[in-house]
Image (cartoon, helix red, strand yellow):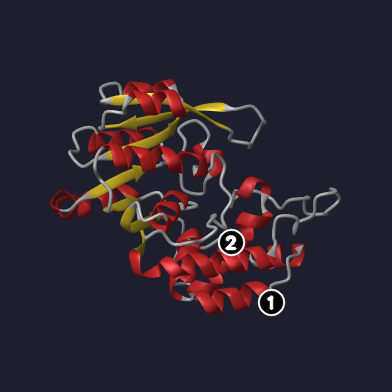
Amino acid sequence: MPIKLALQSPLRYPGSKASLVKYIENLIEENSLQGCHLLEPYAGSAIVSLELLKKRIISKATIVEVDPLIYAFWKSVFFYTDELIEKLEALPVTIDTWNNFQKFRNTKMINQFPVVDMGLAGLFFNRTNFSGILKAGPIGGINQKSIYKIDCRFNKDRLANQIAEISLLKKDMSVIHGDALHFLKGQYDYTRKNQCFLYIDPPYYAKGKSLYRYWYNQTDHQKLAHFLMPCDIPWLASYDNHEEIRKIYNNARALEEMYFDYQVSNRRKEKELLISNLEIPPGMRSIYL
């Protein structure tokens, strides 16, 4: 049965996929994939896995994240919940903390610091930096002269409640650190023998370098496409609407457009591509596109 949770991801991301959850839910149901194992190899906010698990559309989920701070956050949420919440509640949300936490932002190793400390830093930068971008500066600037201060998006009570609720999904959630494509290739035999669904949300093609600490170059995007295009495992990918991505996935079974509001450099809505090896029913196109 569905779990009665008011789930939202504690993490803020440009182009959040919260509005895509219902679309994926319907795609899974239309293809009789209910109860499948969802693999989300570009975890980020992990909102798709969280919401579909909550509603019991899927039976379990595996999220993969290459950024050590985001991986450590999700690891802490599910396996060190109480310690994470305790440290969150005691954390001063100030520029001094932002400066002191730079040591976490400068590491690429997942074992250089305790996992909860790194996870807390990942949450801190996500909630205090401009648009949730880990590599960006703090809301309000270093001198905090803006009317919006560094703590304006850091509601401790709400974040603690979200973390506590999300942790209830622990038994059906796996958290892995690593490169998404390496993970997918390593899981291919397992995935083919089990009912799985891949949700692929890679770094944006055009703005990836400015939005993420770990982004893809042209070759990386092509490698992902070369894996997905012949893949017989059900998959859906969401991408920024770029001509180069259209070329790479030109022969995909389904390639549709959907509007999202990135809310990074402007407030206008942008089109995003939905690419899949599944046929998208006409009714879904008219409802969601």
Q: Is residue 239 left or right of residue 57?
A: right
Whole-percent x and y of residue 128?
Answer: 68, 56
Please tell me whether residue 77 is drawn above or below residue 198 in the rendered image: below
Q: Secondary structure at mark 1?
A: helix
Q: How far apart are labels 1 and 2 at the CA level?
A: 14 Å
Q: Is residue 63 left or right of residue 232?
A: right
Residue at 21 percent across and 54 percent down: it is 187
Whole-percent x and y of residue 193?
Answer: 13, 52
Q: Mark on residue 123?
A: 2
**Residue 244 in view:** yes
Whole-percent x and y of residue 258?
Answer: 47, 27
Q: Nearer the viewer, residue 41 or 16?
A: 16
Residue at 44 percent across and 56 percent down: it is 50
Residue at 29 percent across and 37 percent down: it is 30
Q: Is residue 99 left or right of residue 6?
A: right
The residue that disc 1 covers is 90
At label 1, the amino acid type is Ala
Q: Quadrant of residue 266?
A: top right
